[in-house]
Amino acid sequence: GAVVSQHPSWVICKSGTSVKIECRSLDFQATTMFWYRQFPKQSLMLMATSNEGSKATYEQGVEKDKFLINHASLTLSTLTVTSAHPEDSSFYICSARGDRGLGGYTFGSGTRLTVV
Amino acid sequence: AQSVTQLDSQVPVFEEAPVELRCNYSSSVSVYLFWYVQYPNQGLQLLLKYLSGSTLVKGINGFEAEFNKSQTSFHLRKPSVHISDTAEYFCAAGYVNTGFQKLVFGTGTRLLVSP
């Protein structure tokens, strides 16, 4: 149990276009989802926390207008990178947490975004 | 601010040798601790976690970790590593002042197992 599907696993897009990444909890209801960004050979940087049906809470320094997060249902959250630029190229990982008690974080498999 | 420190960025070890990956966390009244493994271009897989109870936690793939409150440490150990254990390992902590909502990650330790 506790599977999170993240799609796509990789994407290449042109500079100036927008890219949407989906994160789905397959067998549980994710009351909270987290979006991370990981630079090569570095740790995970939390970008934002989203609760179903409410606006996401962004970490300091993360542009909310550039990284749009929607958590419209208990099983789906999306991250849209708007007007992408090469510096947005990175590995993005989502994590979902349900009602299975504290400590129940499940991570998606990540999305490698390359902006050319 | 809370922080998690992984002092070793890289740990080389020979196959079948024991290994310890170090993790220290900033002190708190209450903390949850996790170890995750990441293979190239993949997400994070939970190895083990400490929420409460016994300070020795056993996880998957033969890994274990010990919660040491006095030393604020949660070191990961394996008595005999395999080539397939080569990966990046992250220690993470959840703190009570964020309702245990967010995880604070260490910078990661790359375990390199050679024959």
Image: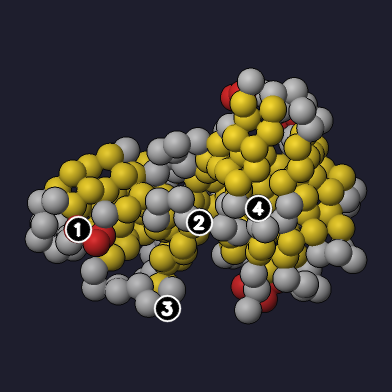
The residue under the point 17% across, 61% down is A85
Image position of A25 (left or right of B13): left
Q: Are marks 1 and 2 on the same chain?
A: yes
Q: Quadrant of residue B88?
A: top right
Question: Which residue corresponds to mark 2?
Answer: A43
| Left or right: A58, with B109 as reference point | left
Q: Which residue is mark 3?
A: A60
Residue drawn 30% across and 73% down?
Answer: A64
Lower position in the chain sequence, tag 3 or tag 2: 2
Placement of the N terminus of chain B among the 4 image quadrants: bottom right
Mark 2 belongs to chain: A
Residue under the image location 32 percent in, 38 percent down: A9
Q: Amino acid at mark 1?
A: Pro
- The residue carrying mark 4 is B8
* Residue type pointed to by label 4: Asp
Q: Are marks 4 and 1 on the same chain?
A: no
CB atoms of marks 4 and 1 within 8 Å = no
Q: Disc 3 and disc 1: Cα gap in Å?
A: 21 Å
Q: CA distance from mark 4 to mark 1?
A: 31 Å
**Residue A41 image point, x, y percent:** 46, 50
Q: Are marks 3 and 2 on the same chain?
A: yes
Vertical comparison of B36 with B114: above or below: below
* Secondary-structure class at tag 3: loop
The answer to which of marks 1 and 2 sits earlier in the sequence is 2
**Front one among B21 and A10:** B21
Q: What kind of element bears circle 4?
A: loop
Q: Is residue A71 visible?
A: yes
Residue hosting label 1: A86
Q: Position of residue A66 (x, y in %)?
A: 24, 69
